[in-house]
Image: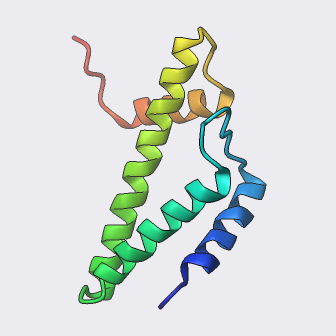
Amino acid sequence: MRITQQDLEVLMQEVEQEDPIDFADLPFQEDELRSLVASHLCEMADAMDGFTEEDRRLTLLAVAAKLVLENMVLHIQLLRRHGLPLNEQTEALLRRLRKGKPDQEG
């Protein structure tokens, strides 16, 4: 399946309608950042042409998981830096993650 950079940018914007990104006061244009990311992901997808369908899915899942983890870590760091409590969703996610692991204390 091929997707153009422009089509991916449009899809990104549609996803952002449900979950907006706070670009804050970054010294970059939102569209330029979106274009950069879309270009990188299209190049990554093209590089996977020789992959099996399963390897492609696993690679994309690993990349997505890494990005979600990185986003969560950065979000928590920002909240801590500003002395703000974690939002309800982040607290719920962390509670769920803690329940899934054996108690490492004692």
**76 with respect to 67 (left or right):** right
Q: Nearer the viewer, residue 32 or 97?
A: 32
Please, is residue 66 above or below residue 104 in the view? below
Q: Could you tell me residue 1's position as x and y percent?
A: 47, 91
Quadrant in the rendering for residue 98? top left
Question: Residue 25, position in %: x, y?
Answer: 66, 32
84 over 55 or under it: above or below:
above
Looking at the rendering, in which quadrant would you find the C terminus? top left
Give the answer, above or below, for where 4 lies relative to 83.
below
Q: Nearer the viewer, residue 12 or 18?
A: 12
Pick out the residue farthest to the right: 17
User: Does residue 59 appear left or right of residue 92 in this picture?
Assistant: left
* Residue occupying the point 63% across, 79% down: 7
Tag count: 0
The residue at the point 35 percent across, 73 percent down is: 44
Q: Residue at x 55, y 77 (%)?
A: 5
Residue 33 found in image quarter:
bottom right
Location of residue 18 with respect to 1 vertically, above or below: above
According to the image, what is the colour scheme of the structure?
A: rainbow
